[in-house]
Image (cartoon, coloured by chain):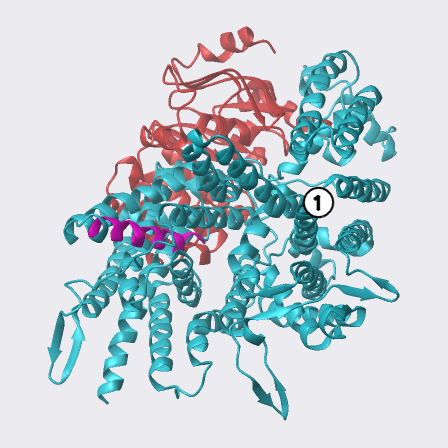
Chain colours: A cyan, B red
Amino acid sequence: MQTFLQYTILGLALGGAYFIAASGLVVTYTTSGIFNFAQGAIAMLAVFTYWQFRWGWGWPAPLALLMVLGILAPLLGAVLYQVVMKNLRGTSEVTKIIVSIGVMLGLQALATWVWSPTSSTPRQFQKFLGPKAFAHFGSLTVPWHIIISFIIAIAIAFGIRFLFVRTRSGVAMRAVVDDPELLQLNGGRPERLAMISWAGGSFLAALAGILIQPMIGSAMSAGALTLLVIDAFAAAMFGRLRSLPRTFMGALIIGLTTTYVVAYFPSKWTWSSSFRNSLPMIFLFIILLVLPQDRLRGATVLRLRERFRMPSIRTAWIAGLTMMIVVFCLKVIMAKTGVNTLTLALTFAIIALSLVLLTGFAGEINLAALSFGAIAVMVVYHFGVSGTGTAARTTLWGILLAAVVTALVGALIALPALRLRGLYLALATMAFGVFVSRMVLTERTEREIFGLKFTLFTAGQLAIPRPKIGPIDFNGQDAFLFLCAGLFVAIGIGMVYLRHSGYGRRLTAMKDSPAASATLGMSVVRLKLSIFMMSAAIAGIGGVMMAAQIGTVNADRFDIFLSLALMMITVVGGIGYVSGALFAGIFLIAFIEALNLLLKKFALDYSTLEAIFMFFVSAVTVLPATIGITMGKNPSGAVSDIAEGMNLVKQSKPLMITVLGLEAAIWALTATEVITNWNFVILTLANLILVPLVGGKFLMARAMRGVPKPVPPELIGIDRPFTDEDLAAMDHALNLESIVIPSSTTVREEPANASA
Amino acid sequence: MSEAHYHEDHGAVAGAPLIELVDVRAAYGTIEVLHGINLSVPQGSVVALLGPNGAGKSTILKVVSGLLQPTSGEVRLAGRVVNGASADELARIGLCTIPEGRGVFPNLTVRENLWMATMSGVSLADVEEIAYARFPRLGERRKQLAGTLSGGEQQMLSMARALSVNPSVLLLDELSMGLAPLVVANLYEVVAQVSQEGVSILVSEQFARTVLGIAQYAAIVLHGNISRVGTPAELEDELSAAYLGS
């Protein structure tokens, strides 16, 4: 009984802290419509800042609290809204998710930068009123910190309810979600209200973090803390991101069950601690399962700012061929480490292709691509390797089996969430990703089920050999590089074919308007399910290739944050394009790596400036997130911008010949070792960016005199206004020439002006 | 019709105009939808904007209400240029806009919806008193979510705001959209009542007959231009041409 009470109180306090974090999510979501993935990261940053003030610099607790909770956290929230989130109105759910993930990764990188995780003294965080402050209730002793936490949670619950129901500003905050424009017409200021709510949400995140950290009692870690508040997602879902009482209930249930698992599961169950850690994610999943079907909303077709144009099949073949040639040319001049990095980048690009297929084509979201890769790798490890030692090879059947299994697992994950909006599927996949990281990839012990003995993740790492397909052995690095490049090109071209097929058109239709698709008799769920399975299979194949490139992979390779970063960079690259996936792989693996090496080389070469270069090395860790955050400004992705520039080159033969000629010359110089590889990189970039720029200026001047760029008919009215010729052409196409507008109408006195 | 001609005709007759649009152009993105609108609403009068779908009526109202900034030209309110003022600023100085569709917050209760009207400076008690007196049905449903009201009741709720905030200007966009004729007649009675209190009203309407009963002036909007302005009687013949002719 004593134990039960003790753990119940602990569970209530933990649940209270979860509630505070979850309520912050609800507040920001209800006012801005943005699900703030960065909530956990804000909590984490607050914990580190508080630690710095309180124990790093020895400030008294009230002052440190005032500084963090009263000033810094609300300020961070307000700034985030003003600088980042405000720009997200009218963007798709994908962009909203990606930008807040960008903020999350950015804050995390920032924390690791400032508070190095390899510091010699572990950062400890103490309970309020000190570690020895206990309250005694009869025979029961409870730390004051626990009591304080629970009381604060209840106070917050009532406070928020009071705000939302009893104050005009609070009601106005709810009104913002319904219709910001109407609120403005009433005289309200929606932007200011949203900013205040973000400040409040950030405050709540910080408070939750500071309350939770001492309850865990372990040393502070940026990743663990960020994920900890992700556990609060489940509670927020329990209240469907709306109802605070239900959120409170959900938080308490999660808090209590997790503590009871610790208390009552027999200690011989080695998996109970992983189970406890993944429990909130299991909850999240179950909640998504029982949520009622989302209404199809036909009336809310937004005019989104994202637009993707699909290349023709011919262009895809040319691009694929070009890519193979470029890979070959690069291989010739690159050092062995360079080839390794390039191959790894291509394997990531294959995984990113799965995201392009799912998100770019179908508008659904998977935040745990690498976790599907992990599943595939485990399948290959157990069933897809023939031979031993250096003769071990991954078989083609192993890879195919892995693809099938990941597709089935994908179906299992996606099925419950497919009835719901995109955000819920995103959360379900994220729950799956965290579950795989915490529960599956931590499995080291041998288990026996139905007489079958196996260990899921042997010794914390799995060795995956290179594949041998039929008579062709891809063990050599060069051969494997070409396999990966070929695989990317093949899947990429396949996707372009798919996009041009009837199936692809149905996907686009579904992405644009699920309601319209459903009324036309399409089974939206079957379509979503099939595309999700296909995407999971591609992620699985990419994961196997990634593991085969590295050789031996541990759980860190499938980290959820890496999945998130890959998704984010793919969106930056252009989630609607196959080239966006290539960009993601190259950028995330090769570019960051190269930038790091270059900066470190500079730091060595110019030792007086070492500090500055090392600063930039750290800054590079924040770079991907920073780029992700800027997505709000240009939701169609970076590649489309680059492609616009390249269009100039394509349109002008002399310019094309100049660029290609120069590039060939640079390559030849490098191949004959006249110039170094670094110079090759720099000159290539200069050639690809500067020459079109200068040539473009010249061409633009000429284009001004000539005809404007043709606009495809379906985009007239969006890219440029209708002209009289367009209207005439349309009338002609519709056989409307016989209908003559009566010229006698006196009302139309300025016909020339009317359609200008 | 030239701008000068128009001013001679009407601008001068009814004294100082409360709303004035001078050569206003407006665009959505790169597409211009208003090509130089000149219009004035004399103090205390009802001006109806008539015209077919997509003519630019709602856009004119959006520009006046501050939701859409004109690309050129001037919007004047009681003689002051208000280009660049935001919709909420204009709302707080006495401009009341009932937007197209139902101007209610569906996830707020009737009472909370009325509460939002108090941002222009009136007290909630006054708003509730006026609203429930004119529309008793709203009083019965004060705790119900506005989204669960019928279309007519929702429009009553949004009209209640126009009644209770003492605006000097009222902008109404497609009041009758999707409503039963009887409800529409009822709503236009309210508009007439508001007008008698001296409020200047600019109303857009596709169904001309209903609004012409209470309007002093009407302007026919076609293809982003005002093609004709006059009293309802003068415009009677033009109307059928405007709707059917193009």
Residue A91 lies in quadrant? top right
**B111 relative to A594 in the view: left or right:** left
The spot of residue A124 in percent (x, y) is: 27, 60
Comparing A424 with B190, the one in front is A424
Q: How many labels does the image show?
A: 1
Indicate the position of residue A25 as horizontal and vertical percent values: 39, 56
In the rendered image of this protein, does residue A334 appear above or below residue A542? above
Q: Please tell me whether residue A729 belongs to the stretch shown in magenta.
A: no
Q: Mark 1 points at which residue?
A: A577
Residue B192, quarter of the rendered image: top left
Of the residues shown, which amino acid type is indicated by label 1? Tyr
Q: Where is residue A161 in the image (x, y as percent from the top left)?
A: 28, 59
- Is residue A593 at all visible to an observer of this figure? yes
Relative to the observer, which residue lies in front, A694 or A706?
A694
Using the rendered view, name the quadrant where residue A650 is placed.
top right
Image: magenta residue range? A36-54
Q: Which quadrant is the C terminus of chain A positioned in?
A: top right
Q: Which residue is drawn at 86% across and 34% down?
A: A733
- Residue A352, relative to residue A738: is it above or below? below
Which residue is depicted at the point 56% across and 37% down? A598
